[in-house]
Amino acid sequence: METMKSFLAWMWVLHLLLALWLATGVFSSAVVLAQVKRTADAAERAFGLRLVWRLMTVFIVPGVLVAGGLGFYLVSGFQYGFGKGWIQASAALYVLLLASILLVQVPHFHKALSAQEGPELERFARAPLPAMLNHVNALIILVMIILMAMKPTP
């Protein structure tokens, strides 16, 4: 029994570290995208889009997948169950976060990598939805942190 508690504690720490990993990618890509929109230089814009793609593949996608998987594991491991309102809200927010990352942002920035200079690169750099979703994702992460830390009762 003590080994299981120790294992759950380590999984919880790993979950927290991966949540920080994810938040690092989301918040830093917001800064990079803001600079991409402000620059007039095509080379800087292309570099910014490559940097966002790197943040997406190194921080955001692994963070959202592994932290989310560990989060669902911890809900059952700590025997919270999925009946509590804060867990249901967190799960719904997680699914929304996962969908926006995997279904909108990843395909957009993957296509942006192959964009040539000119109007095509400009179109990818100035696309409003992926940049807006980045801010929405940051807000979702903040709300999830509050829900997880406060564990409000139903």
Image: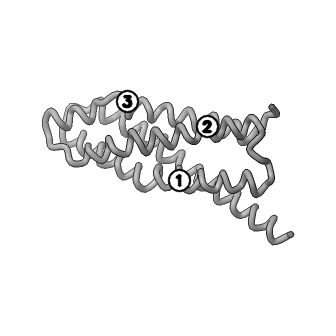
Mark 2 vs mark 1: give the one in front.
2
Pointer 2: residues within 10 angstroms few (<14), some, or many (20+)?
few
Q: Alpha carbon of mark 2 to alpha carbon of mark 1: how far?
A: 15 Å
Q: CA distance from mark 3 to mark 2?
A: 20 Å
Front residue of this view, candidates 41 and 57: 57
The first of marks 3 and 2 along the sequence is: 2
Q: Earlier in the sequence, mark 1 or mark 3?
A: 1
**Residue 69 location, x and y as percent?**
60, 55
- Please provide percent x and percent y for residue 112: 26, 43
Q: Secondary structure at mark 2?
A: helix
Q: Which residue is at 80% across, 31% downward? A: 154
Give, as a three-letter code, the residue at label 2: Ala
Front residue of 31/50: it is: 50
> Label 3: how many residues lie within 10 Å, few (<14), some (14-19) or many (20+)?
few
Q: Is residue 126 above or below residue 45?
A: above
Q: Nearer the viewer, mark 3 or mark 2?
A: 2
Q: Which mark is residue 123?
A: none
Determine which residue is flagged by label 3: 129
Image coordinates for residue 48, horizontal then vertical, percent? 30, 43
Q: Which residue is mark 2?
A: 92
Residue 65 — which label?
1
Amino acid residing under circle 1: Leu
**In this image, 43 relative to 104: left or right?**
left
- The foreground one among 105 and 28 is 105
Does 34 sit left or right of 39 as displayed? Answer: right
For the N terminus, give its image quadrant: bottom right
- As rendered, which of 20 and 67 lies closer to the eye? 67
Above or below, 79 relative to 85: below
Marks 3,2: beta carbons within 8 A = no
